[in-house]
Image (cartoon, rainbow, N blue to C red):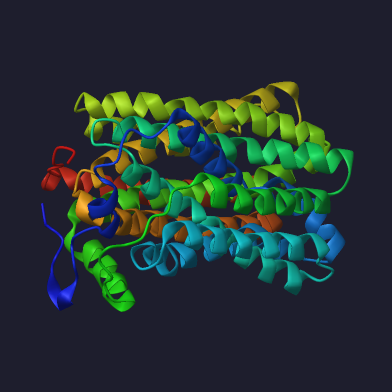
Amino acid sequence: MSKMPAKGGVRDASPQTASLSKTTPVSGWLILFLATACGLIAANLYYAQPLVGPISAELGLSPRAAGLIVTMTQVGYGIGLLLIVPLGDLFENRKLVMTVIALGAAALLASGLAITPGIFLTAALFIGIGSVAVQILVPYAAHLATDETRGRVVGNVMSGLMFGIMLSRPVSSFLTELTNWRVIFFVSTAMMIVMMVAVRLMLPVSRPTVRPHYFELLGSMARLMITSRVLRRRALYQASLFATFSLFWTTVPLLLAGPDFNMSQAGIALFALAGAAGAVAAPIGGRMADRGWVRPATAIAMASVPVALMLTHLGTMGSVFSLVILVLGAIMLDFGLTCNMVLGQRAIFSLGAAYRNRINGVYMATFFAAGAIGSAVGGWAFAHGGWMWATAVGMLFPAMGLLYYLTEYLRPLEIPKAS
């Protein structure tokens, strides 16, 4: 396995590792706070996903361009992962997190006040950028923990993040049913303001002891993707699934609100809540990885996504049976995505603690870029050919991922033990 190259003067030592690795065990209250913060911030990425219909209708966005509502947020998140997250190795982390959350809060407010598609889509871009505070907090939690508790601490924080993601869609749908789509953005703006104050009061100061140049960090991230076969493959595997995940959750609200099902926002919220059951895959994937079953588990996780889309065509569209099958398909899709993400993180975080933040940034940015493509293509496909076209396009992404995965048997990956 390739090690992190030390070209161009890149310092491999993680700045916060030196200052925080010998701290006392992090308190349960602080873990709970970090998990809650990650969940609330990550939810901002997904509030608009089930609201594509009402937002497009009110702002005058064409059906062909409706997918951009989700795409712009994901593009912003990808930009933030590549350009903002590395700043954690340059600036005091607490202040950086507060600044990024403030940017996200301003963008949320602008989204709620938007009266034109251009204003909303620009604000959506900055919501994505502001949401990368999560990817500063997760490595921050790892640095706060002792060596003996690091896995448990990061696992608990990640559970909060996943909880926020899975509940964001039903919460925004329920609130829109009771009021209108703008309210969720105003509510989240208020929560982010409270979160900034809480971060200031709750988090310990974390000042980098080593200050590499910003462009050195960016260059090292590019070299990681080029030289690390494990990182490159796991990022592309997850990208093929996340593109379909984003396509599905961008277009299924349009299907459910359409003439076949004619569901209200409350009904769409219940559907999303049922689909969240796929989150149970996280501990299952972790156990499989711990037992050395990474390769077969990856194959199962990746294959489950296109199978889930095929299942959604069983029965007559609009019937109770087809709705049940749609729910099962959503659960299976979320299951496959979540399981593969855990398997991928286990693999890439075993590459070395010295550059774990940059590995995480490259990994997340790669598959979120694919998610942005999936959302945009999904909106276009649904506008042209309905659910049939959307799912046909959605199956192409994991199919390509599986073909790439099969080439692994020509030269098996060697995943090192966790460091």
Q: Quadrant of the C terminus?
A: top left
Residue 280 located left or right of residue 143? right
The reply to whether residue 44 is in sight is: no
Residue 55 located left or right of residue 18? right
**Vertical comparison of 11 with 267: above or below:** below
Q: Quadrant of residue 256?
A: top right
Q: Quadrant of residue 299?
A: top left
**Vertical comparison of 241 with 359: above or below:** above
Residue 14 located left or right of residue 188? left
Query: Where residue 74 sits: x, y (%)?
Result: 55, 59
Q: Looking at the image, which residue is at 74% across and 74% down?
A: 118
**Relative depth, front residue between 261 and 16:** 16
Q: Looking at the image, which residue is at 69% across and 31% down?
A: 271
Residue 374 located left or right of residue 327? left
**Vertical comparison of 49 with 95: above or below:** above
Q: Looking at the image, which residue is at 70% across and 36% down?
A: 170
The reply to whether residue 151 is in sight is: yes
**Relative depth, front residue between 222 and 302:** 222
